[in-house]
Image (cartoon, coloured by chain):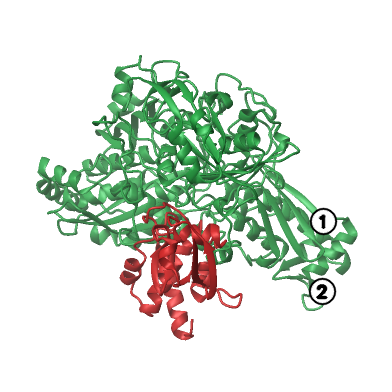
Amino acid sequence: MSEDREPKQPGFPAGRMMPGERRLEPPRWPGGRSQPPHGAFSVIGKRNRKVEGLAKVTGRALYTDDITLPRMLHAKLLRSSHAHARIRSVDASAALALPGVHAVITGKDLPACYGIIPWTEDEQALCEQKARYVGDPIAAVAADSELVAEEALRAIRVEYEPLPAVMDIETALAHPEWKVNEKAREGNVSKHVHLEFGDVDGALEQSDEVVEAEYWYEGSTHAAIEPHCALADFDATGFLTVYSATQVAHYLHRDLAKVLGLPTQRIRVVQPVIGGAFGGKSEPFSLEFCAAKLSMVTGRPVKILYTREEVFYAHRGRHPMRLRYRAGIRRDGTLTGVDAKIQIDGGAYSSYGLVTTYYSGQLLTAPYRMEAYRFDSTRYFTNKPCCGPKRGHGSVQPRFAFECQLDRLAERIGMDPIGVRRRNSIGADTQTVNGLRITSNGFLQCLDAVERAAGWKQKFRRLPYGRGVGVAGSMYISGTNYCIYPNEMPQSAVQLKLDRSGRATVFCGASDIGQGSDSVLAYIVCEELGLDLRDVRVVAADTDLAPVDLGSYSSRETFMAGNACLDAARRLRGWIAETLAALWGCAPAEVTLAGGVACSSRDPQRECMSVKDAFQLAEARHGTLGSVGWYQSPKLGGDYRGGTIGASPAYSFTAHVAEVGCDLETGFVKVATIWIAHDCGRALNPVAVEGQMEGSAYMGFAEALMEAHLFKPAAPGHGPGLHHGPSLLDYRIPTALDTPELRSIIVESVDPEGPYGAKEAGEGPLHPSIPAIANAIYDALGIRCERLPFDPPSILRLLRESDARAQWERARGQVGAAAGAGVAGRSAPC
Amino acid sequence: MVCRLRVNGDAVACAVSPNTTLLEALRYGLGLTGSKQGCDKGDCGACTVMVDGEPVLSCITLAAACEGREIVTVEGLAKDGAPHPLQDAFDLAGGAQCGFCTPGVLMSAWALLRRIPNPSREEIALALSGNLCRCTGYTKIFEAVELAAARLREAPGR
């Protein structure tokens, strides 16, 4: 990621500005890394259990709040009741005088600014000068119990000077002088990106049809069922341990050092089992710094557990976006130019906003080839909880808008929407208009699969009024090309220890957030070394015990940690195979390790032993058995400022068909089924991949129809900025009754650089849900949903405001005519 | 005050305040951390436990109100060190991803299967509609309950 100024980072080398020309190169294995070590897979591709599964279902898995330390104190944060206010003074004397209160800290105790992106460090653990949203933390109290801490919060006197609050993009633009965030160089602009590839205006002029429309993507939040929790323990030697529900232990480690002024080597960050994250725990939060500081002040362990209400205010969820698209097409179905103008409501701080702004444009350039593309994206600061990365970071919103555009373009030229998508599929081993390298690509197979499974040809424009089907596609990254702070070190690393008892232990910084990354590491070790799943232990996400992995974000764990693990295991496998080959007088390639048995393929009956015996022989020959593996992506991306943002070593592809039924009286849309076809390269465990696909489609469905992260305007007795309903009742997330039937279809394109050919599955399959539903609603009712969520009032309004039924009739007639001309439903070769 | 409960078959006594919830008594008083706190106001279902055979939200139930009653938590489902068929089915079918809602889901599902040994999809969805899961999209949860139901019908007794 290239930016203007080099950030200063104590403790870790800042590295050079631009990534160097020479990058570490992964080892090359005979036959490549996408194939099994010998013959056929014995573990990979099987419907295996997860390594921590039984601990979770028996209630034995320890989450952060399940950990209690002796003499532990509980802390609470005092939060601003104003959306925007100068803090004149904070008087905690009355709070400190309460029995059971041990310490109070305020902004001046933790003055250092931090932020996940080194160029935009604009947050303090506790606000010192100014509060920027309702809920911005101002002080923290450590006490014997949460109840006493809460009582103490009420005794703290804060003198505020209220300032005008910027509650939306319009106000941010209209009042640049109401500066929300002083780090903004201009008005309330958090980040502006303008990039153009090819001659967009020329391409649009030479189009047969151009469609222009504006869309509004409402904000939403992660709502992981586990609230954020951190437990800090500063011991007598000056060593700090922080247990936290974080998905980025390494980045937290760095920021703790920076804010607390401690050397990094005296801090340990441990991620216990985590109760869901979805991007909502992918940067440091106030609670980690405050628990640590309070532990340093009191000399006792300190725990902070956010209430559900606090989780809503901590947020970092999906950015609301206003998106205006112009897109052109030729009569033969070729997509020409795409022009996007995007305004992003960022909330009070930067968070990942720099990346969000780039992603809002950069990740649209596949799976369809476009001749020319331009995007102009601006993120604005507003006095609301900060937005950040939610599953499908930055690209879900433009994907919604663009896939709706594509549906409109297809209709204009009388082509089947699946046919249009096939016609423009960018294919494998190519480059996008903005310079992203595409390797494996199973998008056409995804389209075929959903077309067939959904019975598309019998349903599209053929169902009775009120029922319809819609299609959408997408692509997503398998990890980012660079670390968030520039450096030349691996993005992921594994240390693998083999024990003469016949046991392997994988040490890796990777963060399992429920997606199963620990299990992926174990499967790989089992496949390479012939072990039983129960004989592999994974020690992960502990900065003391495991080598650095950058964490669970941008769908990087399977690809990057998986590759690191594959290399470590394959190195050990080589030593063992060599040892046995020498013993049996065969070639190392003839040695097989599978199912707990080592044997030669030549004479497996006589030349065989347990893998445990093989480990012992290898240890006698080579010394203690241990190895390392690491992953560093190749140099990728376009040769322009920002050209590396969006570059990934591999891209996943997805297609959805959604079928809906709409109640004309109530405006209620029921999504009956979503067919999800996803190209994950290779499914290392189909159960886990399907779980990611279903969970993604569910979350997209939720954003399409139900969720809205809204804030109240000023009301009597309170200024603006209160959350509309900060509870899991008022913020409506789907229950088992609301969720549609979800049908997963795995497509395997086998990526040459992925571990056994695997790519991501955790975020890509969210994207098409929303536009597939919107397009299905059009097929059902003849109305175009351009604003999220598609709730009953907005459906009824659209039905009222347009001649929906006539539009619906026209759309049907058009497909009939086009089919007669041999265009609609045409099946392209794969 | 002292609250006497029967938890997972054991008679236990727990020091509580009048405002201590059953969830707090279980988690912090008795060390039964399997039951989870996701919202603290009865919205998410992660705290679901069985009280006298009925699934109950322990975060909005006072411990004192459970005096003398029979409570089963997720820790009480496994017998003789072996997971309950329902737990095993969740593990096998991918019914737990992050696992945080799982203890509550399991208790609701267990209550359902005791009532209806062969539930339909609709009956499962209804029985679990008070338990929010954010990871799975519920599909693998339904499959796990159906798998467990089939296994329990073949080998009843749990």
Q: Is residue A486 visible?
A: no
Sequence-first disc among 1 and 2: 2
Q: Which mark is residue A625?
A: 1
Chain letter for green, please. Answer: A
**Residue A375 position (above or below residue B27):** above
Instruction: State whether residue A693 appears in this view.
Output: yes
Dot 2 corresponds to which residue?
A607
Residue shown at the point (40%, 41%) measured from the top left: A312
**Which chain is home to disc 2?**
A
Residue A53 percent location from the top left of the image: 56, 63
In depth, the one of A830 and A349 nearer the eye is A349
Q: Say if mark 1 contacts mark 2, CB within 8 Å.
A: no
Image vertical order of residue A715 relative to residue A424, above or below: above
Real-space CA distance between mark 1 and mark 2, rounded to the nearest whole angstrom: 22 Å
**Closer-to-camera residue (A503/A284):** A284
**Element type at mark 2:** loop
Q: Residue at x 40, y 59 (%)?
A: B45
- Residue A333 place in picture, x, y as percent: 30, 41
The picture places residue A606, in percent across and down from the top left corner, at: 82, 78
The residue carrying pointer 2 sits among few (fewer than 14), some (14 to 19) or many (20 or more) residues within 10 Å by Cα, namely some
Q: Quadrant of residue A218?
A: top left
Q: Colour of chain B?
A: red
Q: Nearer the viewer, residue A130 or A337?
A: A130
